[in-house]
Amino acid sequence: MIEYKIIQQHNDPDLIDFINYVFSANSRPHDFIKLLPKVYEPQAQPDVVHLSAQEEGKIRAVVSVYIYTLCHGELSLKVGFIGNVSVHPYHRGKGYMIKLMEMARQTMLEQHCDIAMLTGQRQRYEYFGYYEGCLEAGIRVDATNLRHVLGRDYVSPLEVTTEFDLDEVYAIYNQQPVCGHDKKTFEVVCRGWSSQLMAVKENGVTIGYIVAGENHDSWLDCALPQGKYLQAMSAYMKKFGVKSVGVGKPLYDQDAIKEVGSVGGCQLHWSAMIQALNWENVLRWSLTVQKAGDGDAQVGPYHVAVHGGSVTVEKNCDNPMPDPNMMFNLFPVTEQEQYPRGWFPLLLWVSHADHF
């Protein structure tokens, strides 16, 4: 008999053994306590719900929801990020995932999440109502790019170091347009998926931070002053002996995109699949963060007004929402032109360090 249960302990040994086995069998060896300390370290206190299908006490399938809240000034956006989507290889094709994904959605609604997110194969999750979102500029800069722009004998005035004062680094994080972790959680988040938090210093003063990926060829998150990205990349490549580094930036961070994208190769892509659970808050959040142009328009059942940076969203009818492809994609230009400047696509985004 199959029972669907919530696993109460976030680092339950049977849960850890199960996901380690399934993901290790599918690819390289996994140790989730080390890979995702924000969820599984014994001292961690995550807001996470583990949903399972069990047969005679044995876990056969799991879907987990990691819940956190992002802030932009006085606005907040509650995110439910789905992970651990796994079925035992000997027990697939029995409909466990259909049931667990519906339970995950219901859990997020009960927890008043504004948006659900996950990563994975597009068509697989479209069956569950997810669509591509979180547009970002993925930029890769290599040593040749920097040599042509900065000069062959360039020596960066910046230092990238794994020795840092957490208070200083956290203060910089907390000044970003979008943040949401306390100091303790921020430090743990920055260690996810074998990443490493580093400080960027100039004349001994911390001016920014980098969350470097496992192989030092990517930055999962970063915050640097305008005009310092290329200098930091030069210092970083020299320190770790890598030939290139990639970084993803939301499309509303135009200063960083202009600085880095004018030098390296830039591609636009979606960084996650999403499903809006509270359209009113998703619209209010996105249009505020991306500094949408002034105007009034009807968006599905909502009358939306943007004036002087203030966004109001009020439901006034029962119209269906527009096609999410129009709302989160760059390319349906004709449909988007019906709305005020800068409204669509919605540029909602979370850093890769905040992925499950």
Image (cartoon, rainbow, N blue to C red):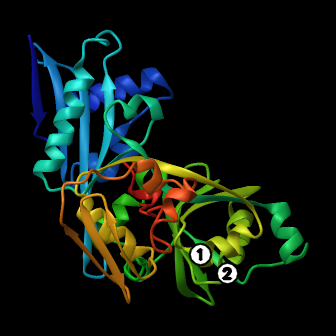
Which image quarter: residue 230?
bottom right
Mark 1 in CB contact with mark 2 (< 8 angstroms): no
Q: Residue 310: x and y, percent?
A: 32, 84
Please report the residue visible at 32 percent of the width from the left and 27 percent of the height from the top.
86
Q: Residue 219: x and y, percent?
A: 57, 60
Q: Residue 223: x and y, percent?
A: 52, 75
**Which element is circle 1 on?**
helix
**Does residue 114 sit above or below 83 in this rendering?**
below
Give the amino acid at mark 2. Leu
Residue 3 in the figure: left or right of residue 300: left
Residue 276 in the figure: left or right of residue 31: left
Residue 280 in the figure: left or right of residue 146: left
Marks 1, 2: nearer the viewer: 1
Residue 105 in the figure: left or right of residue 30: left
Please report the residue visible at 41 percent of the width from the left and 28 percent of the height from the top.
124
- The answer to whether residue 303 of the structure is visible from this angle is yes
The foreground one among 345 and 257 is 345
Please tell me the numbered disc located at residue 254.
1
Which image quarter: residue 251?
bottom right
The foreground one among 114 and 246 is 114
Give the amino acid at mark 1. Gln
Please report the residue visible at 25 percent of the width from the left and 81 percent of the height from the top.
74
**Does residue 111 sit above or below 90 in this rendering?**
below
The foreground one among 287 and 47 is 287
Q: Residue 128: x and y, percent?
A: 31, 33
Q: Which residue is label 2 attached to? A: 158
- The answer to whether residue 181 of the structure is visible from this angle is no
**Which element is circle 2 on?**
strand
Which image quarter: residue 239?
bottom right
* Mark 1 or 2, nearer chain start: 2
Please report the residue visible at 40 percent of the width from the left and 27 percent of the height from the top.
23
